[in-house]
Image (cartoon, helix red, strand yellow):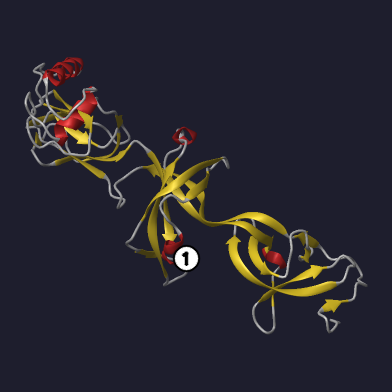
């Protein structure tokens, strides 16, 4: 029986299970399933390598091959087509006197400064051409190289050996060689997740590694839900890895992600299981006083940490108070 002051007699068949009210940093996480793979375009589509050489395909990469910048991508008429790093597609012949963004990215591949094609550019290019078995001209004709942002991993080959290599035709579909985690997040949680949010990633062997959100999609996608006739609406979230070396031996692996979406300093924290509903509405906890009596203390709920099962509360509580939790 509860007394008028909101307390209950201390005489009990057994003492209640309690937890201590703590004070400190509380973070909230969203937990979801993800897939560890390779970086694609921001919308999730693969990168396309567009051929500009003319002739016959005499060598093509295979699905799963990795091609580094500066390496031979494929061959047309047995002449190497190089893969070079850069965001601007090849669109013209390059030789001494040319300048612009495309020249700057060529120079970066050759470790030459500036955005002009100079004698130093030509000299460095001749060394690369000789190394790759190309005609040593010190010029870069359109068709001799394809620019991609970084080294790539082949995921599809559109060209066919022995067929004509047409200028402007897609020859290879690729992902970047950089590793990335993708998550199909419930669209209702989109407003909670931001670029830069920290992420803990649990790998298939239960080891963990860290990362951060680099993109939150703006376009929702509908997919089949678990129940018959139902659908889930999701948005794509992309996560970069702090230590890609932690996942070198994994490919398209299922992972579990915990995205930290908010934090509060100096929060009063109790276990979620200690929170009870009030008949008049709202929430409360049952505090055990030093003399063993119990009292109902109304509280307002703040940030939830669903991973650790804790919640921020405000009310007539103090750090060190003991609150009742269900017995196990």
Q: Secondary structure at mark 1?
A: loop
Q: Badge 1 is on which residue?
A: 226
Taking 45 as reference, is 72 above or below it? Answer: above
Could you say which is closer to the camera, residue 298 or residue 192? 298
Q: Is residue 148 visible?
A: yes
Is residue 133 among what the camera can see?
no
- Which residue appears at 12% of the width and 23% of the height? 79
Residue sitting at x 10%, y 31%: 99
Tell me which residue sits at (74%, 63%) in the image: 318
Relative horizontal placement of residue 46, taking residue 283 as reference (left or right): left
| Residue 305: x %, y % from top left | 60, 58
Split into 4 quadrants, where in the image is the N terminus? bottom right
Q: Which of the pair 226/182 is nearer the observer? A: 182
Residue at figure coordinates x 52%, y 50% from the top left: 256
Placement of the C terminus among the 4 image quadrants: bottom right
Does 95 sit left or right of 316 as displayed? left
Q: Is residue 102 above or below residue 223?
A: above
Q: Is residue 299 left or right of residue 13?
A: left
């Amino acid at each position: 029986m509860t007394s008028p002051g909101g307390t209950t007699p201390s005489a009990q068949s057994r003492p209640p299970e309690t937890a201590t009210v703590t004070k400190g940093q509380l973070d909230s996480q969203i937990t979801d399933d993800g897939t560890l793979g390779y970086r694609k375009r921001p919308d999730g589509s693969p990168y396309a390598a567009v051929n500009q050489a003319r002739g016959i395909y005499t060598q093509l990469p295979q699905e799963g091959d990795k091609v580094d910048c500066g390496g031979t991508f494929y061959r047309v008429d047995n002449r190497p087509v190089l893969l070079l790093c850069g965001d601007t597609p090849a669109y013209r012949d390059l030789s001494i006197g040319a300048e612009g963004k495309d020249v700057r990215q060529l120079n970066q591949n050759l470790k030459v400064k500036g955005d002009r094609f100079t004698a130093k550019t030509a000299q460095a290019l001749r060394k690369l051409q000789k190394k790759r078995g190309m005609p040593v001209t010190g010029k870069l004709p359109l068709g001799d190289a394809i620019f991609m942002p970084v080294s790539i991993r082949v995921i599809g080959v559109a060209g066919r050996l022995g067929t004509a290599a047409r200028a402007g035709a897609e020859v290879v579909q690729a992902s970047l060689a950089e590793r990335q985690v993708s998550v199909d997040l419930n669209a209702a949680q989109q407003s909670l997740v931001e670029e830069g949010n920290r992420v803990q990633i649990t790998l298939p062997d239960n080891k963990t590694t860290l990362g951060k959100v680099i993109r939150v999609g703006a376009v929702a996608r509908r997919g089949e839900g678990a129940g018959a006739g139902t659908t889930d609406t999701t948005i794509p979230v992309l996560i970069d890895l702090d230590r890609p070396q932690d996942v070198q031996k994994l490919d398209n692996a299922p992972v579990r992600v915990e995205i930290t979406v908010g934090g509060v300093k100096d929060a009063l924290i109790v276990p979620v299981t200690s929170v009870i509903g009030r008949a008049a509405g709202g929430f409360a906890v049952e505090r055990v006083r030093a003399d063993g009596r119990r009292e109902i203390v109304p509280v307002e709920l703040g940030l939830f940490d669903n991973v650790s099962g804790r919640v921020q509360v405000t009310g007539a509580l103090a750090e060190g108070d003991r609150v009742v939790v269900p017995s196990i």
